Amino acid sequence: MRFFIIPKRMFKKQSDVENIKQRFYKKKSFVIIVSVLFVAVAVLGFILYRVNRVPSVSYCEGVGKFRLEAYNKEDREKFFEQFSYAAEEVAVEEIIIPCDSLQFEEYNNLQKSQGFDLMPYCGKQAEMYTLKLSKEAESEIQLFGVLIVYKGRVVAAHITDFVYPACVKALTE
């Protein structure tokens, strides 16, 4: 199969023509290999991006869509405003999200009922923020909101009173 025609009279020897053809095919092979590698790297990058992507919104019955940004203190306090709470941040702690216990399964079931799922974050390092909550209808017991944040997004949240035995409740209770 010939891709180009080289007039034989331009060259003194047949070997000159063969050398040019060989160089052309080497360049063509190089371009094909580089193109295939580029496409493979692009596909791999896209897959890794999709796997590590943290959503920016979630949905919960009774509340609807709610935002998950938690890059700074204001974002974390605004998160609880979506659930009619005024919040004030009081503590932060670095944690590793566990995934191999019955307690984790129970906690994750609570999170799934709110539109979260901790399974993709098992074993990953995250921050746990505790916020003091208040509502218009004040109760006798002080409530606290707990956020688990991974890469600036809320991946789990609950409300507790920290009274023994601490009661972990969904955001909408």
Image (cartoon, helix red, strand yellow):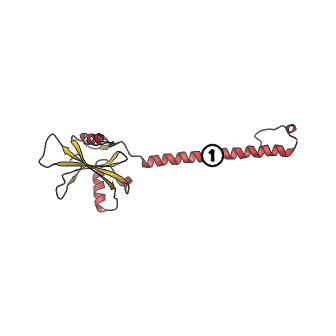
Three-letter amino acid code at disc 1? Val
Q: What element carries label 1?
A: helix
Give the x, y percent position of residue 21: 78, 44
Marks counted in the figure total 1
Determine the residue positioned at 82% across, 43% down.
17
Which residue bears the numbered disc 1? 34
Closer to the camera, 171 or 153? 153
Q: Is residue 118 above or below residue 2?
A: below
Closer to the camera, 124 or 62? 124
Question: In what quadrant of the picture does the N terminus appear?
Answer: top right
Determine the residue positioned at 38% across, 55% down.
124
Give the x, y percent position of residue 71: 34, 42
Determine the residue positioned at 80% across, 45% down.
19
Residue 103 sits in quarter:
bottom left
Give the x, y percent position of residue 172: 23, 45
Closer to the camera, 39 or 78? 78
Give the x, y percent position of residue 65: 31, 40
Determine the residue positioned at 83% across, 44% down.
16
Q: Residue furthest bottom?
A: 101
Q: What crowding class fits label 1: few (fewer than 14 Cα within 10 Å), some (14-19), or many (20 or more)?
A: few
Closer to the camera, 170 or 163? 163
Residue 9 sits in quarter:
top right
